[in-house]
Each structure stands twice: as C-alpha cells, then as structure tokens.
Amino acid sequence: MKIRKYSEMNEMANIASDGAVLVAAGPDLYQSGRLQNILVNRFREVLEYEILRYEGNELGEGDLKRHILENSLFSKGKLILISNAHRLGKAAASELLDAIEKGLSDTAVFLQTEKVPRESAILRKLEKLVPFYICYEPFERDMPGWTKRLVSEESIVLSQDAVQLLAEYSGRSLGRLSGAVTKLALYHGPGAEIDRKGMLDVISGKGGKDIFHLGDMIFLNRRREAVDAAWSLLRYGEEPVGMNAYLFSQWQKVIGAMEIVEGGGSRKEVSAKTGARYTLLDKLMKFTTTVYKVDTAVAAEAFAEADHGLKTGVDHLLVFTNLIFTLTSDRL
C-alpha cells in the first residue's frame, strides 16, 4: 500500500504497535533514517521492545521465521530492522511474506532500502501488502514544510528571511537542512527567535571550523584537536564570550546526561532532561562515555574563570587553553 506523503508515514511510525510492518525505500537516506529513529524510540522507550538489526543478505533460510516466532526473553516483543531489504534471499522473502499474511504477534518489522520497487521483486510485492513509502529527494516546494517541521521540533522560531536563507543554504538536501537547524538550536537555545544575522552567525563557519566542532572535541576528550579548533575560531573572529557560554551550556547537558545514565536512567529520561532528540541525542549519549570526568565544582570554577578572563583582557587563546586542559585529559 503506497504512502505518498511523508507526513502520513511519519504518523504511522509514531503510532506503530505490535504487528506493524513498514517499508521505507528510495535514495533519500535522511527520510528513511528519520523514520527508523522514530520507530526505534517508540518501540524501545514506549513499548519496551527489543531491537534486532539485520542486513537483508544476512538472513538465511529459517532465520527470519525463528526471529518472528520466538518470544523475547527480556522484553515485551521485538522490532526487527532490516536494511538493504532488496537483498533478502528467496527463502527469507518467502518467510516474511508468509508472516505478513498470517499476522505478526509480539513483533514489528521495519524494512529499509535505497532501491525502488521497479528494481526488486520483493519490494514490488511488499508495496501491495504493507505501508510503503518511497524516499525521494524533496521538491523545492516541499522544503518550507520540512523547515517548519524541524524548526518546531527544536523549539526555535525563524524570521521569514531566515527561512529563505536556510532554504538557499540547504538546497534540497534534508540532511543539510537538519544539520543547520540542529546547529541553530544548539547555539541560540530553545525558544530563540532567530533572524538572518543570527543564522549567518551559525551556518557561515569560521576557517573550516565551527563552535560545534570545538564542543565535540572537548566532550570526545580530544585535547589537541580542541585547542586547534579554539585557535582557529579565535583567529577567524568568533566571539569569545559566546564561545564560553555555548561550551558551558553544552557541558551542563553532558553532565546532566551522565548523571542520568550512571543512575541507571534511559535515553528517554536523558531526552526529557536535555531536550535532545534523534541525532543530537545520539551524540549526547556518546559524550557520556567519552567526556573526561572532572569534578563538577572544578569545572564550574574553570568556566567562571574563563568568563572573567575574557572580560578583563586576558589573552583569549590562553583562556580557552586553560579551560580545555581542565575539561580534558592528556591522553592522545
């Protein structure tokens, strides 16, 4: 059953439950990846299902049938993710079609592929049986809708000229659009109203580096790269006090996420506390395992000293080098 609008498939993913089988095909990986993230978050956090991931060609005869019929030992059910679905062998494809015909119990399936039905027999059959969305690069007329959706999810507001600039910057690439919106939300914060200048401050970049790269290097505990990034940003005119404020805001999110994870909390709880979602949440969860664990009082004092130094004429590179040395270890 062919779904023609992304919004319809998005809604199906948001309310999917036991027995659901959804297919995202076609070349635009951002849309299929987004749908998969929605399903994974829903089934893992809301329905408490186990997530199983397979490549189409990995599933031999009997494998898919066993996964569908076996009960999950530690979860209420299973969400089976199958990438490169066009590469399903004859036996696995037959088992999948048979399961769809009979109905699934305690199991849901999401299939993803870059191919389209005309290129694959199994895709042509699935298109007639289950919700099937083809992820093509959007038309220019679709970009304002996508911009509105992504901006709303990040709880920011763009002026009309900023929207136009973002469309120009993104072209028809949803991945580029999503990355820009995430950067704007990170830099300006939730609830911000962003005009053209506020957008240019973020997406123009400085000498091949940006403030987001600096934050990544610090929280990935890459001291040398962090110092290089700070030097590059300062050299190309990034505003030092704004850099420090951004890093402090991100440090608070990382520390908050660490406290939740170390206390046995879930991704859902981290998302609720920090407001991070999808790829941003993935990055934040990664930082909880890589960030250098410095005493929070020491780190907070380092940020305060950096703020004072920047406002009283201390050499800016020295200020950030001292801050980076506090927040990272000396391992290479």
Image: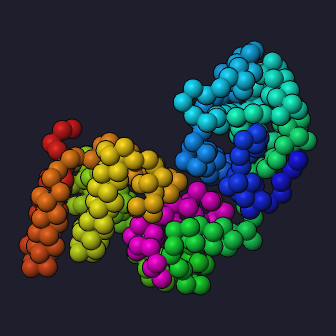
* Residue drawn where x is 54% and y is 80% of the image: 158
Q: Is residue 4 visible?
A: yes
Left or right: 319 as drawn, with respect to 126: left
Magenta span includes 39: no
Magenta-colored segment: predominant secondary structure: helix
Left or right: 194 as drawn, with respect to 229: right
Taking the view exactly as shown, the residue that stands out farthest to the top is: 61
The answer to which of 53 and 167 lies nearer the viewer is 53
The answer to which of 27 and 32 lies nearer the viewer is 32
Classify residue 145 by image quadrant.
bottom right
Give residue 19's position: percent from left, percent from top.
Answer: 76, 39
Query: In the rendered view, would you say 89 is above or below 255?
Result: above
Left or right: 104 as drawn, with respect to 172: right
Query: In the rendered view, would you say 256 is above or below 160?
Result: above
Magenta span includes 181: yes
Classify residue 76 by image quadrant.
top right
In magenta, the rendered stretch is 170-193
The answer to which of 172 and 19 lies nearer the viewer is 19
* Residue drawn where x is 67% and y is 55% of the image: 14
Give residue 210's position: percent from left, percent from top.
Answer: 36, 62
Q: Can you say which quadrant of the picture contains the C terminus?
A: top left
Give residue 253's position: percent from left, percent from top.
Answer: 34, 60
